[in-house]
Amino acid sequence: MNIPVSVGPMNEGERIRKPDMYVELAGPKSFGFELVKVVDNAEDKVEVIGKELDEMKEGERHPFAIIVKVSGDNLEEELEGVLERRIHEFFNYIEGVMHLNQRDQIWIRIGKESFKKGLRLKHIGEVVKQLFKEEFPFIKSCEVTIITDPEKIKEELEKAKEIYKKRDERTRALKEEDVDVFYGCIMCQSFAPTHVCVITPDRPALCGGINYLDARAAAKIDPNGPIFEIPKGECLDETLGVYSGVNEVVSERSQGSVESFCLHSALNNPCTSCGCFEAVVFYIPEVDGFGVVHRNFKGETPLGLPFSSIAGQCSGGKQVPGFVGVSIGYMMSPKFLQGDGGWKRVVWLPKELKERIKEAIPEELYDKIATEEDVSSVDELIKFLKEKGHPIVESLGKEEVEEVKEEKEEEDIKVPEISIPGEFAGLPPGIKIVLYNCIIKAEKIVITKEKEPKK
Ligand code: SF4
Ligand SMILES: [Zn+2]
């Protein structure tokens, strides 16, 4: 089949903004999913169930699902997660197609130009089919079904969710200490060039699409692919989750921009975040605790910011102390944030997320963690935590006492005069200065523009 637009890695990273968009498929305001299934006898074909692109109107939003069945010798169920994650890449290879996220979180946009050139869903299906067979020669036949019929998607979505759940459960019995190697993934470096995911039995990748067993299967079958082995090396700090092998590989694969990862901390050398994370952990300095917000949460966190603003703080492959992108699967591990005190430091969760991971939250803490229904600001959060007797309140009290003491001592100290170089105020526009974990106390701050020296 002839594809009317270009297909290849040069199109990766292409963003389709609203004015250039023909239609939006799935996404946060609609629904959908992607799924790869290993079956015994897939037929080599592409099918579209529901409306084709030319039956949709410009500017519309439609539900969307893609189910890819693959057959071949040595194909194991364990590979499904990893093959499925490649759909993201294959879609983004197509000119005028933008694909974000994974599983039942996918979000796709089709560009006007490519639609005008003749691009249709059947072509997208054909590209996916061909690329799967080219990239994985052990796939003998590939059957792609694209669905835009909302009722059919709803029906299939429930089945897909069951499959995702089973996949995640399979790896839960394994622990970090049981294995000698972890896995790394750099698939997202196309848009987050310094990002490296470290996947351990306790820490499924932040996109939620690849767990430890998925990664192991992928590295075995495609040793030169984006997923690779990381020998653990020496354990330098068990609680924080620091390993010499991880640090070596991360430093090499992030082109030297990140030197060390603490796998289980959001405050000390946290892992980098690309942008596909299922949830973000964020530090709330006023209570010295953490909130976690997931992608589907539509409201505001107690910081007054929605998911998207918080996500913006740490995406793009940056290591930002105080923020870390995580998968929901990682929240189910007993090692979740253990380097920062674990669940005892978690003070806020959206209600939906809290219910979803109920079994992972220590029983005695469950009612002490606030949701959007309990509080809508940091002040209200502090009040809630005190009322409920959240363990963090103990340390809150201590800090207040310490602060008073410090202030008394400060009274006798003479503060030296400090001058800031003139260039400081003359920074070019667009530069952002971010201060973390920093308290600035001043009676008055005056910033004036330096006059041009007379010539
Ligand atoms: S988020 Fe991580 S594991 Fe998932 S595809 Fe990107 S780099 Fe790989
Ligand atoms: Zn990513």
Image (cartoon, rainbow, N blue to C red):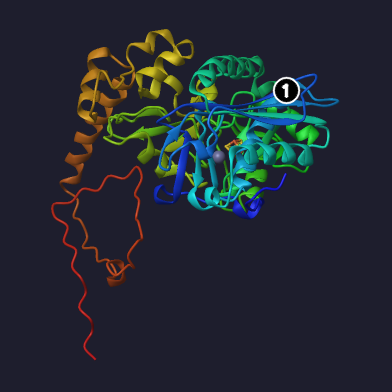
Residue 223: x and y in percent read: 79, 39
Q: Residues within 10 Å of mark 1 (few under 14, many from 20)?
A: some
* Furthest residue in direction bottom, as rendered: 455
Q: Residue at x 31, y 35 (%)?
A: 285
Which quadrant: the C terminus?
bottom left
Judged left or right of residue 402, residue 325 is right
Position in image of residue 453 (x %, y %): 23, 84
Residue that extends furthest to the front in the rendered view of this protein? 55
**What is the total number of numbered labels drawn onto the structure image?**
1
Q: Quadrant of ligand 2?
A: top right
Residue at the right extreme of this rendering:
73
* Quarter occupied by residue 322: top left
Label 1 sits on what residue type? Glu
Quarter of the picture containing the N terminus is top right
> To which residue does mark 1 refer?
78
Between 32 and 305, which is closer to the camera in this rendering? 32
Which residue is at a point 18% across and 55% down the rendered structure image? 414
Does the numbered disc 1 mark a residue whose Cβ is under 8 Å from ligand 1?
no
**Residue 271, can we see it?**
no
Taking 366 as reference, is 171 left or right? right
Q: Residue furthest left?
A: 443
In which quadrant of the rendered view does residue 46 lie? top right
Q: Quadrant of residue 397?
A: top left
Residue sitting nearer the eye, 201 or 453 = 201
Image coordinates of residue 39 in percent, x first then y, are 76, 20
Q: Secondary structure at mark 1?
A: helix
Q: Nearer the viewer, residue 28 or 398?
A: 28
The correct choice, above or below, for 259 with respect to 288 in the image is below
Evaluate whether residue 111 shows in this view.
Answer: yes
Q: Position of residue 360 (x, y in %)?
A: 48, 14
Q: Relative to the observer, which residue lies in front, 132 or 55? A: 55
